[in-house]
Amino acid sequence: MAQLVYSSKINKIRSFALIMVFVGFAFMYGGILTKKIEWLMALFFIIGVLFIVFSCVVYFWIGLFSVRAVSIICPSCDKPTKMLGRVDACMHCDQPLTLDKDLEGKEFDEKYNKRKYQKKN
Ligand SMILES: [Zn+2]
């Protein structure tokens, strides 16, 4: 069976924001390439700026998330990591982690973060 690798949510959002920055720059570069057509250049630049602004918002959002996240020491690599929700993965070694004693030893599953599983009794 294929081993699923879960990466930390904060890391996921962070790489998403980074991709947004690159997409923004790609659009701006497109603007430079099309500078002969003024409206097209302006359009590319506006889209590029929007992407970069959006990634800034996402970075800010990560900041808010990090405050809410629980800081723990990973049992697997002994590094401090932050987790979001009931189950998450270590930011350094992708070790699945849980805050819930009931879920300890169970197969790591993103579904435990869904509301349906939050209060079962
Ligand atoms: Zn770890």
Image: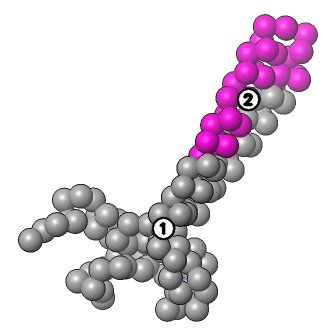
Report the image quarter containing ligand 1: bottom right
**As rendered, which of 93 and 34 lies closer to the eye?**
93
Q: Secondary structure at mark 1?
A: loop
Magenta-drawn segment = 30-58
- Residue in view at x 53 percent, y 63 percent: 67
Whether residues under marks 2 and 1 lie with C-beta atoms below 8 angstroms apart, the answer is no
Classify mark 1: residues with Cα within 10 Å, few (<14), some (14-19) or many (20+): some
Kind of residue indicated by mark 1 = Ala
* Real-space CA distance between mark 2 and mark 1, rounded to the nearest whole angstrom: 30 Å
Residue 102 forms part of the magenta stretch: no
Question: With respect to residue 36, does 95 lie above or below?
Answer: below
- Residue in view at x 22 percent, y 65 percent: 118
Q: Which label number is shown at residue 69?
A: 1
In the displayed structure, does residue 14 sit left or right of residue 113?
right
Which residue bears the numbered disc 2? 49
Q: Position of residue 113 (x, y in %)?
A: 31, 64
Quarter occupied by the N terminus: bottom left
